[in-house]
Image (cartoon, grey):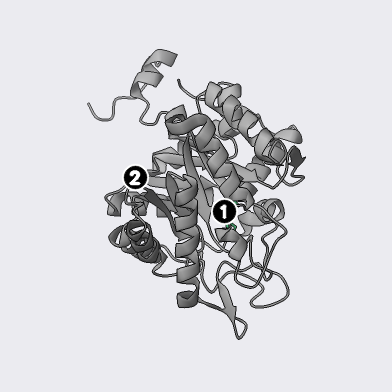
Amino acid sequence: MNDRPRRLRRTAALRDLCAETRLSRHALVQPHFAIAGSGEQPIDALPGIARMGEDALLRRIERDRELGIASTLLFGVTSHKDPLGRTGEDPEGPLHRAVRAVKRRFGADVTVMADVCLCTYTDHGHCGVLEHGEVHNDKSLPLLAAQAVSLAAAGADVIAPSDMMDGRVRAIRQALDAAHFEDRAIMSYAAKYASNFYGPFRQAADSAPRDQGPKDRKSYQMDCRNRAEAVREALLDQQEGADILMVKPALAYLDVIADVAAAVDRPVAAYLVSGEYAAIELLASAGLADRGALVREHFTAVRRAGASILITYHARAALEHRWLDD
Ligand code: PBG
């Protein structure tokens, strides 16, 4: 019986009924880059994605919402930089202004996730404080916690620390609770690898490491040779109080997504990063593959691996072109 050839009549509907993975708009988070002022600046490295002033961002999110995308991950981009990245806590900084404006306009209809990190705000471009040419983990924690509280005060629903300092989830949770923001969630970049796929983002956010300090982020982001370490990182972040655990990038780390999803007791998010987006756009624009089919395959692989949340620059296109199941 078992060796009977499987020549079933698989109609499209039967394939749909038997599919183990479905793609829904409810899984998607659209990242956006907020700048001071008005209007928008296209990002060469990310075709179709722009840095936006408040007015343009509100229009964009309004359209995202009409398409069915209810969550956004916001990044601030600024030329005001200093050694400690203090613009990251400035209530008049671009990210804070954007968070306030989006919450004022859309209230509970749009979930605002705010990136917490120092790299866009430091003059050296590292995600933590530099001391004697090294990134100092523990001295970075109070700055990250203060930035998180300031973003919660601006109205952020979810705080998303992307810095990869050890112990920052606990520091942020304690600071949020002390400031009576017990109701705000933390989505931690639990397993964030020192990846080559972040290039377009660093152009978009003006956040690449500069002349001082280490030339890369390998002292605090994960080594791509490690898998078990990712599970340890995720379990630690869960213990420290993270509500959602993220793996990043996505496609080159499907094994990590699967392991983390099996080990933790929280929703798992995967960040389909800028380089993954750009790679798909390049393939499609060269006429080498169909854009929608590539995006569907990418999304499906990441969902199949075990992520329930997809943070992706393709969210909007997926809805506009109806690449999802619903
Ligand atoms: C900053 C940060 C990075 C990304 C998100 N937050 C870049 C980095 O660590 O250098 C990358 C996102 C992307 O490539 O889309 N800490």
**Residue occupying the far bottom of the picture:** 132
Please, what is the three-letter code of the amino acid marked with disc 1? Pro
Kindly identify which numbered label has been placed on residue 19.
Answer: none
Q: Please identify, in this view, whether the residue under mark 2 or under mark 1 is nearer the observer.
A: 1
Q: Quadrant of residue 84?
A: bottom right
Q: Measuring from the top left, give residue 246's x and y in whole percent.
A: 43, 51
Q: 87 or 325: nearer the eye?
A: 87
Work out whether 221 lies above or below 69.
below
Q: Secondary structure at mark 1?
A: loop
User: Which residue is pictured at 47% across the width and 44% down the height?
Assistant: 155
Please, what is the three-letter code of the amino acid marked with disc 2? Pro
Work out whether 90 lies above or below 215.
above
Side (left or right) of 164 relative to 178: right
Q: Measuring from the top left, give residue 101's x and y in whole percent.
A: 57, 38
Is residue 57 visible to the viewer in this orientation of the structure?
Answer: yes
Q: Earlier in the sequence, mark 2 or mark 1?
A: 1
**What residue would you read off at disc 2?**
267
Is residue 255 visible to the viewer in this orientation of the structure?
Answer: no
**Residue occupying the far left of the picture:** 1
User: Which residue is pictured at 62% across the width and 54% down the height?
Assistant: 197
Q: 202 or 19: nearer the eye?
A: 202
At label 1, counting other C-alpha atoms closer than 10 Å, the crowd grade (few under 14, some 14-19, many 20 or more) is: some
Q: Measuring from the top left, give residue 298's x and y in whole percent.
A: 53, 38
| Ligand 1 image-quadrant field | bottom right
**What residue would you read off at disc 1?**
91
Side (left or right) of 6 relative to 281: left
Q: Measuring from the top left, give residue 227's x and y in whole percent.
A: 41, 62
